[in-house]
Every structure is written in C-alpha cells, then in structure tokens.
Amino acid sequence: MSSTSTGSSPPKYSSIPSAYLILIAARLWLSLTDLSSTLKHNQQLSSPLTSFSQLQEGIYLFNYDIDPYSGGSFRHSPLLLSFFATILPNSKKLASVLWTLNDAVGAWAMVQIFRSRQNVKRSPRDNLVAALYLLNPYIFLPSLALSTSSFENTLMLLSIMFACQGKSSASPFALSFLVHLSLSPIVVLLPLLLLLINDPFSHLASPKAMAANVKSIIPLFAEFAIYFGALTLVSTLVCGSWAWIPQTWGATLTLPDLTPTTGLWWYFFTEMFDHFRPFFLMVFSVHMLIYVVPVCLKFQYDPLYAVFILLGILGMFKPYTTLSDPGLFLSMTAIFPEIFPYLRHPIVTALLHLHASLLMPLFHHLWLTQGTGNANFFYASTLVFACANGAAVVDCIWAGLRIAIGPDVDGYTIAQE
C-alpha cells in the first residue's frame, strides 16, 4: 500500500509570464502599423525634448558634420545622438521594434521591483503588474509615438530595481544616465540612495525611525557624481564643445521652447512678461525640489514609497511633461497593493483622469487642427489633468500614512489635524 503525502506543494509560476509575452507580441504588432506616423507629432505624447522627429533631424545634421545644437531647436542628449547615429536604428520600422523592446524591459523591471517589495521570487500577480505597465495608455501611446520619454521611464525603473536588489553601482549609474537625458529626475536621487542602504519591503504599517546610518549615502552620492561627470565628459567629446549643455539641460531650466505640452509651464510663460520671467523660472524650478526632503523624512522608514511619491510630483510639475510622466506613477501603484483599502477617493481620481484624457485630445484638435478654439481651451484641459494627477498623489500620500493606524473600528473616528 503506497503512502501519499498530505502536504501541499507550493504553487509554481513561470519565470516569464505567458501574458507578458502575449502583451509584448501585441505591442510589437501595433507598433509596426502606421499608427506611429499619426502619433509622432502629437504634443501630448512627445515634447521638444523627447520628439523622435527632432532626434532624426539632429542625426541627419550630425552625420553631415553640422553641429545640431547650433540651430537652437535640437534638445536631445549627445548620448542619444551618438547611439542612434552609430549603433541604434533610426528607421521607423526598426525604431518601433526598439521601443517595444524598451517597454518590455520596463515592464520586466517593474515586475522585479514588485517581487523585491513582496520578498518573493515569483508571484501570481506578475502578469497583472506587467499588464498595468504595458496596457497603460499613458505609457504605450508615447511609445507608439516614438517619444524618448519611454527610455527615461525604463531607466527610472531599472535604477529603482537595482536599488531594491542592493546593487550599489548599477543603480547610481542608471540614474546618472537618466539625469543626463533629462535633468528633472534628479529629485529622486536622495530617496534612491536611501533605498540602497535600506530594504525595499513595506514598512508603511509599522513606521519607525530609519536604523541605517545616513552618512553611508555619501560614498554612493560620490559614485553617482563620478558616473555623471564621466557621461558629461563623453558627451562633450562627442560634440566637440560644451554648447550642448544650454540646449539640453538649459532648456529644462530656462524653457526656451513654449510648445504646448500636458504640463503647467508652457502657457504660464507664454503670458509672462519678460521682466518677470527669470524670477518665476527660479520659483518653478525650486518648487520641484522643496518636496524632496519632507517626503524623504516622512517616509524614511520606506524609501521605495518615497521614490513613488516623488515620481508622482515630478509627473505634475516637470517642465516638459508628456503623458508618460504621470503614466509611470500610475502604473507603479500596482507595486503597493497594501495601500488600496486606504485610498479615499479612487473613483473620483479615475473619473478625473478619464475626463482629462477625453478633453485634451478634443481641445487640442479644436485649437490646432480645426482652428475653432484657442490656447485657453487646451490649457484648461491640462489643468484638469493636473488636478487628476494631484488627486492621485494626495490620495497615495494619505493611504501611505493612514495604513499605520489600521482598519476602521466601529465607534471611533479618525480625524486629520
């Protein structure tokens, strides 16, 4: 008589989720259609700093030994310029494949972050996490438009993934490469370094002072500075001068191109008198930085959540935003399922995003295509979009703090003072 085991074996999950491969194949098929040609000039999906058309123009000038930064319209990093002029493809079909693979890497990195957060090797939620990234219209529409903001999102996720895995060299390098492409993500440097000296597990329910020595981030910051300086030197050697700096990083600080975007800067500075422009440029730039220390102090026990919150703030106040900037923040909510029961108004936030996603293309078309509207129409819709992003960030901050109190108890009321 054979004996049978009464213990149940743990469930097995594929290291590469099947739904993940199906989504990648579907995205690849969609990217090879003519849809990208229709979307690549859409100002909601790409900005002057991320437009593929401007990147191709810079590559053409670079290949004919003409300085692409001398015209004042090329804003891409010399690293992207050199890679696409030598190694990476710049034809439409091959570029569509490259952007799809880039999103696949981003989705894989987000799954790895989720696994690190849950302290598991595999999870039944892996398919859901990957799908929330690949199927997010704020993510895949800019990718179909071949916006280089998709590369920025992937580099951000890779730097977070390496930090969660404790790779103290790979994470600063990925972030330095990202900051070299776009200066604004520098706001996540501090929480990312704090994540390297802490664990990525959820501590929202049991907040306590950080046990690690904060001084240990100094060598990590020095390593980041070395990587950043080396990339800056390489970029200068590629261009042959320092002229690329005011055209790339300087554009983030001075806003020379007032092309309409989904952000809040362009209309404000279109109406701004030149006399007041330097002052308000300083105010808008510093405004993004003032959140860094308070958020890191409040969530010092969970630096991964601090990174998440600052990404949401960055998606609201970045100078040249596209849909992919708040899209990354919204997709990353899948990494923090513990906060879902404590969100106060998720339906209202979702409806605000739905409202804004319908208004923005409509008013954009009325203004720039039919000519029956004006800039006020489109800017009003971007204000609704900013309110939707702000509501999501505020709700996530509330949920991250509220979870420490625990579930509601009959007869007791939780008041915010």
Image (cartoon, helix red, strand yellow):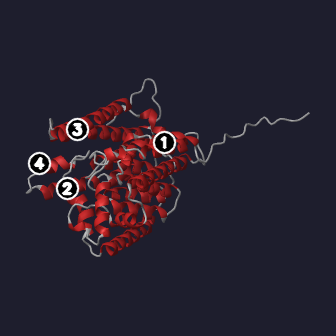
Compute the Cα span from label 1 to label 3. 28 Å
**Where's residue 9, x and y in %?**
72, 39
Residue 26 disc label: 1
Q: Amino acid at mark 1?
A: Ala
On the image, numbered disc 4 is attached to which residue? Answer: 271
Label 4, secondary structure: give it: loop
**Where's residue 42, x and y in %?**
28, 45
Q: Can you say whether 280 is above or below 136 in the image?
A: below
**Where's residue 72, x and y in %?**
20, 63
| On-image quarter of the N terminus | top right
On the image, numbered disc 3 is attached to which residue? Answer: 365
Q: Amino acid at mark 2?
A: Asp
Observer-nearest residue: 228 or 91?
91
Label 1, secondary structure: give it: helix
- Local crowd size for mark 2, using a 10 Å CA cut-off: few (<14), some (14–19), many (≥20): some
- Local crowd size for mark 3, using a 10 Å CA cut-off: few (<14), some (14–19), many (≥20): some
Compute the Cα span from label 3 to label 2. 21 Å
Could you tell me which residue is drawn at 32 percent across and 73 percent down? 236
Q: Amino acid at mark 3?
A: His
Q: Amino acid at mark 4?
A: Glu
**Where's residue 383, x and y in %?**
23, 39
- In screen coordinates, is 236 left or right of 114? left
Q: Nearer the viewer, mark 3 or mark 4?
A: 3
